[in-house]
Image: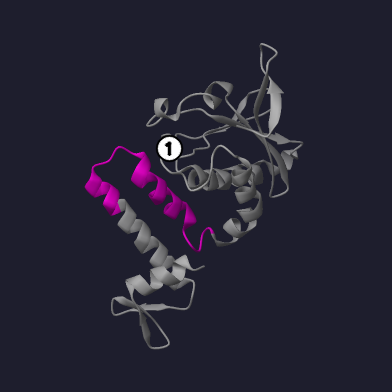
Amino acid sequence: MGSKFSTDADGELVRNIMPLSVNGFDLELIQDKSLISCPPSKLIGKFVHSTSIIAQDAPDNSLDELIETIHKITVMLSLATDSQVRFYKCTDATGMALREWSVNGVYYYFRPPLCTINTQCIVQLIEKSYATFERVEKSYKLRAAVELFVTSGALNLPFELKLAAIFVLLENLKSSYAENNGYIFQNGFYEKNGTRGTFKKLLQKCSSL
């Protein structure tokens, strides 16, 4: 569900547009009309073309920056919706493909971190957090962390593999925190000022950020 209306081919109003202002770009996320009233249970486990992102008045020389911005937005949308959100095609105003990527990803819906009914929560997450996300994304390996988080639930994996993905995620968070906060890895442990950072302590510190 969006916050603005569009008119479909039958002349009916559909509330399926979410305006976004991110990284200097004015964007509109336009949801596929057929999905707004579709029960989530019918989509779980499927690759679903759900959304088009329209960039209004983007300069021609900003294409690379725009594409990278949208890739970052998809990571944040993955976290917000607990699904494998993918950006797989970029077109110009005429519909001609400018860039395409081979991707896989499935829709999942089980206790997402944010309310997906009131989509203003998602808009606020992206607009207010994008600058911070961009600043720490690489040093904290956030793309990998989000992918591990959503993959552990979204894919139809054996329970043991789901647990393995979660433990790899915890290790990712622990080591990223340590490396960005002055800890030195030696003798098989992270240490700082002579104090050893245990797995539990480092995760607790990470979660308090």
Can you see residue 93?
Answer: no
Q: Nearer the viewer, residue 135 or 30?
A: 30
Q: Residue furthest top?
A: 10
The magenta stretch spans which residues? 137-164
Residue 17 among those drawn in magenta: no
Q: In terms of depth relative to the viewer, which is nearer, 137 or 48?
A: 48
170 up-or-down from 197: above or below: above
Amino acid identity at mark 1: Tyr
Q: How many marks?
A: 1
Chief secondary structure of the magenta portion? helix
Q: Nearer the viewer, residue 209 or 111?
A: 111
Q: Quadrant of the N terminus?
A: top right
| Visible residue check, residue 5 | yes
Pinpoint residue 93: horizontal percent, then vertical percent.
70, 26
**Would residue 95 be found to the left or right of residue 57 on screen?**
left
Q: Is residue 209 left or right of residue 199?
A: right
Side (left or right) of 7 relative to 167: right
Residue at 59% x, 39% y is: 118
